[in-house]
Structure formats: structure tokens, C-alpha cells
Image (cartoon, rainbow, N blue to C red):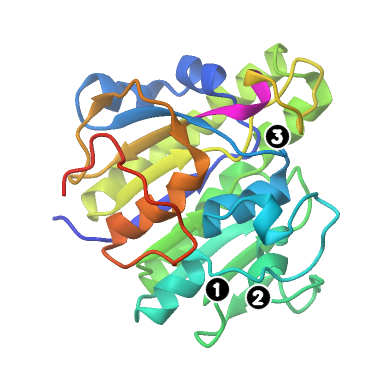
Amino acid sequence: MSTNKVILVVVDGMRNDTATRNLGYVHHLVEKNKAALYKVKSELPSLSRPLYEVILTGTPSFENGIVDNAVIRNSTKESLFHITKKNGLKNATASYYWVSELYNRSPFDVYEDREQEDESKPIQYGRFYFEDDYPDSHLIIDGEQLRRNFDPDFLYIHPMNVDYIGEIYGSESTEYHKRVLQTGKHLAQILPTWIEEGYQVLITADHGMSEHGTHGGTTEGERDVPLYVISPKVTPGVHDEEIPQLALAPFVCKLLDVDPSKEMISFEFPGLEE
């Protein structure tokens, strides 16, 4: 079974080199020609809220104005949530509350906004957490429940524990590597179901992490993140061409078979079969 539906998993704070060493089952799919692997260069600043906006709208910070984590307001750009809704598709997300603040309502109200079900909003179905140590295992289940209950065409899942541990211990720590390994185990448990149900699956990160437990700067460790793609529309295997993060949103539009926004860049994604 094959569909145009997409699940986009953004593992907060996951470096490219750490991911390719620790996501055993996901990399197994690459080795067996069931998935594609790319390296993505994140936009700057390599901070979470600005890069959520980059990934979901395909616009850079100097244009969208989300230049720091402290910018708390609704986005003014057309996101993947807006685009799917406009095209009559259904969307959902299990993610950090900053995503709700960007696309539904700002500031976030923990009592009213934690669970959202309103098809008139850009994010139609949402489950939002507001503490960085909210377990990834729970978050993956939140996303899967949304998938089972509402059958979204676009599902965005955003776990935070890798970033949380990285900021405490740094990217070279045993704790950070174990956390990425654990995230890989969570994904291994759910990926066969998603694939069997016909979803195209993308796994990436917003930014990486430095050995000092920081991000926001320009180093490769902070900017280089992986992109795994499981889709019949994409040639499997390892692709050497570095992908700009601004290309992710229009790429998702291609997989969903909808037109990108006018502000998204035009990019010939290597391995994408037209």
C-alpha cells in the first residue's frame, strides 16, 4: 500500500554523526535499500524555535522574523499545516508547545492548549508538551494515537529528550549517545507499522549539539543533521549531496503532492523521482 501521506519526525538536537552511529534500525533500512540518507545543513541561528519555523515554512530567519527562541508570537508565513489544510488534507502534530505558539495561538495556555482538536485552525489536531524532559516514549505514543484516531495526511512528531540531555552533558558524553540510541529504539518499534500503513516517513533534526552542550552557533556539530527518507518516490541509499534545510518544506510538499508556498525555494532534491 502506498499513499501521499507523510510523517515528519524532528528529533530535537540530534547531530548527524551521532545519529548515523546510533540509529541502528533506521540505518539498517538504508543498508537494505529501503530508505535514503542525506546530510542536511541547518539554517542559522541553530536554535530551536527559529528552525521549527524554517522546517515548517521553508523561509529563513531574516525573512520570517523568528530570530531567537525568545520571539513568542504567531508565524506570519504559510506553514505545512496551512498548506495541507488549504488543500483539503488533514494534519496533526505531537510536539513541543512552541509549535502551537507559532501556528495556532500565542502565548501557550497549558490548560486550554495542551490538547487541540479544531479543523478550522492551521494545526487541526495537536498534543503539546511543555517540559523538556517529557518522555520521548510517551511523545511517540501521542503521535501514534493521533494517527490512529484522526488519520492525518501530514503528521509532525517532535521529541525533545536528545536536546535536553545534550544541553546537560554535551554531545561527546555517554549520556547523549545513549539518549540518541534510545530514540532509535523508539523509532524501530513504530516504523514497521507506519511503513505497512503506507506512510512516507522523514526523520531529521532541527539542529545538532556542541561538545559544550550548546547550540546556536556555526560549527558543523551544531548545524549538520541527518535526513532519513522512506518513500517509494525517493531512490534509497546514501546520497552525498548536502541538502539545505530550506529545501525540506518544499520536499514535503512534493511528497504530499501539493503545491509549495510561493516563498519556498526551488531545489532539485537528489533521488526524488518525478
C-beta proximity under 8 Å, tags 1 and 2: yes
Position of 48 relative to 53 (above/below): above
Q: Residue at label 2?
A: 104
User: How many residues crowd around disc 3 within 10 Å: few (fewer than 14), some, or many (20 or more)?
Assistant: many
Magenta residue check for 191 = no
Looking at the rendered image, the disc whose residue lies closer to the viewer, 3 or 2, is 2
* Quarter the N terminus occupies: bottom left
Residue segment shown in magenta: 221-225
**Residue under the point 80% across and 50% down:** 69
Name the residue rendered at 63%, 19% in the picture: 220
C-alpha separation, residue under disc 3 versus residue under disc 2: 24 Å
Q: How far is the residue under mark 3 from the one under mark 1?
A: 24 Å
Left or right placement of residue 232 versus residue 115 in this view? left
Residue placed under numbered mark 1 in the picture: 123
Which amino acid does the dot numbered 2 rest on? Asn
Answer with mark 3 or mark 2, whichever residue precedes in sequence.
2
Predominant SS along the magenta part: helix
| Disc 2 element | loop
Q: Residue at x 61, y 45 (%)?
A: 159
Residue type (three-letter) at the residue carrying disc 3? Asp
Residue 164 x, y percent position in the rendering: 75, 35
Is 205 placed left or right of 228 in the picture?
right
Residue designated by label 3: 163
Point 22% across, 49% down: residue:
196
Q: What x and y, as percent, mark residue 79?
A: 53, 66
